[in-house]
Image (tube, grey):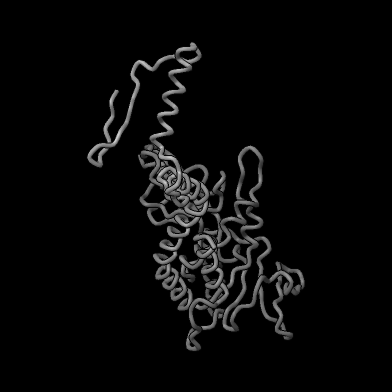
Amino acid sequence: MTGQQLKNSILQMAVQGKLVPQDPNDEPASVLLERIRAEKEKLIKEGKIKKEKNPSVIFRGADNLPYEKIGKNDPVCIADEVPFEIPESWEWVRLGSVCQLNDGKKLQSKTYNNLDARYMRGKAEAKVLEAGKFVTKGTYLILVDGENSGEVFIAPEDGYMGSTFKILWISAQLYARYILKFIELYKEPLRNSKKGAAIPHLNKEIFFNLLLPVPSLQEQTRIVDKIVELTPSVERYDLLSRRSDELNRNFPNFLKKSILQYAVQGKLVSQDPTDEPASVLLEHIRAEKEKLIKSGKIKRDKHESVIFRRDNSYYERV
């Protein structure tokens, strides 16, 4: 298991209600969803968010199966679509029911840094603009264009939103970091479902239709706290896993070099005292070379080297 796979496993347990214990004193998620609906109605009337064309409402039927009512359509059982079981006190919603993608407020004649992905990753210097879509520090920004579509950033300062971003609105009734962890879990599927050939775009249909398991607000906080607590251990595991993979990849070469090293050190096979000494072999080689030099088949070495042992040390005469 790689470090990323371990991280995803923890996130998967989190959204299934298996990472932290349930607290029967928590407010049911159904009450939380009622507050979200009331909040959205208020914000729609104030013109701060858009009204959904076909709002989704997911509920448990008399048969204890999940049903979904979209707009004015009749409810439909979505048991086959639900990816896993969740605790009784949790509820299912579409991600689009609690999140929206919005544009920043257009501003002119005021200088701010351009909050593009490279700048927020610390890989580029700030580029100052005099106009753009203004966002405040702490705003959630999601990449909707490019290879990393679906990645979420937090604006580090007031500035103009990069052209590849949208504002990610998350209901204030939810613990936003829980939603961000859920989106992180689906990072790879979102990347692999991008639309467009020349410039890939976030597949908004898939994004908004993701089924989000919603626990109580208290449990959302406990889940994120537990993930934060486990993160250093996951990072250490990832580092050790990478080192282990590197060792496994290089082991054949290391082994080969080790065997060759033992061989030239005389440690690979046992010594036989009845063998002819190597000094005698070298005398044969010198005699062979003299014969070949005289017959013109090889050239004499101008800087001929002779290495010999004296006083248990090695000397060379050139």
Residue drawn at x 55%, y 55% is 101
Residue 264 in the image, given as x and y percentages of width and height: 43, 42
- Figure check: 45 above or below 248: below
- Figure check: 226 above or below 266: below
Q: Looking at the image, which is closer to me, 237 or 118?
A: 237
Residue drawn at x 47%, y 15% is 298
- Figure check: 169 above or below 112: below
Q: Looking at the image, which is closer to me, 226 or 267?
A: 267
Quarter of the rendering occupied by the N terminus: bottom right
**Is residue 44 visible to us here?**
no
Q: On the rendered structure, is 149 left or right of 220?
A: right
Residue 42 in the image, given as x and y percentages of width and height: 52, 67
| Residue 299, image quadrant | top left
Q: Residue furthest left?
A: 311
How many callouts does the rendering have? 0
Quarter of the rendering occupied by the C terminus: top left
Residue drawn at x 66%, y 78% is 59
Residue drawn at x 45%, y 49% is 272
| Residue 312, image quadrant | top left
Q: Looking at the image, which is closer to me, 100 or 310?
A: 310
Q: Residue furthest bottom?
A: 24
Residue 183 in the image, given as x and y percentages of width and height: 54, 61
Residue 261 in the image, given as x and y percentages of width and height: 43, 45
**Is residue 42 visible to us here?**
yes
Q: Residue furthest front?
A: 274
